Image (tube, rainbow, N blue to C red):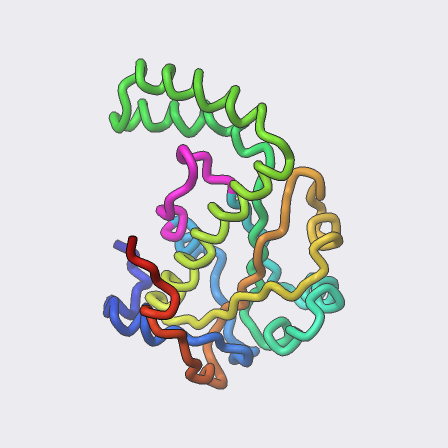
Amino acid sequence: MSNNLVNNDFSDITFGRKSVRVYDENYKISHEEMLEMIQESATAPSSVNMQPWRFVVVESDEEKAKLKPLIRFNTRQNDSSSAMVLIFGDMNCHEYGEEIYNQAVEEGKMPAEVRDQQLAAIIPHYEKLTKAQMNDVVKIDSSLIAMQFMLVARAHGYETNPIGGFEADQLAEAFGLDKERYVPVMILSIGKAKEMGYTSVRLAAEKITDFK
């Protein structure tokens, strides 16, 4: 359990979450705690545990100035947040497959023979996926960790705002990443709320659900 958790109330963390757009611009989150939150968020599920998510934490004034023209109408979050967390999907995530599965064996979570069987099936399968198919995989998996990060952040006493309005074709290169390999999925602002988000409505479960 993290030493930095200030809220362990599941109901409040989950159902009290709102999108916050204005933060205390003087509050900074330490690298240690940011890495802790990312590590906790990485317990999110991913397809065959390939963990395709990659993070870039934009926190300095210089780097935020670089980000600002790329985020359209979301500049309030950029100006006041402790950081803007860019989440990318790694189109070549299967290159880490052996490392991931070896670690599972070393930690006694998987027999070596199961690792070998799994990798023999998974790696060739991933290598055969089209770009469009791989794009779907990494975006779905990276969206799972994005939601988990938002909830983990609330447990640490912070608020967030998921942002999809940005220049997707420019984001990776702007921060030194290969745009063919790293697909931008979402940006999350994070910090101490200065103005709480507003309450919104949701469609009734009956309206969005079919039982067959």
**Magenta segment boundaries in residue numbering:** 40-52
In the image, is residue 49 part of the stretch drawn in magenta? yes
With respect to residue 55, does 122 lie above or below? Answer: above
In the image, is residue 74 part of the stretch drawn in magenta? no
Residue 180 pos. (x, y %): 70, 39
Asked where in the image residue 1 lies, by quadrant, the reply is bottom left
Residue 11 pos. (x, y %): 25, 71
Q: Is 106 displayed left or right of 53 in the figure?
A: left
Residue 61 pos. (x, y %): 68, 68
Residue at x-position 46% and y-position 34%:
50
With respect to residue 141, does 102 lie above or below? Answer: above
Q: Is 4 displayed left or right of 200 in the figure?
A: left
Residue 167 pos. (x, y %): 72, 60
Residue sitting nearer the eye, 140 or 197: 140
With respect to residue 103, does 57 lie above or below? Answer: below
Residue at x-position 53% and y-position 27%:
126
Q: How many marks?
A: 0
With respect to residue 76, does 132 lie above or below? Answer: above
Q: Is 58 displayed left or right of 199 in the figure?
A: right
State the predominant SS element of the stretch in magenta: loop
Residue at x-position 36% and y-position 66%:
156
Residue at x-position 32% and y-position 69%:
206
Residue sitting nearer the eye, 158 or 187: 187
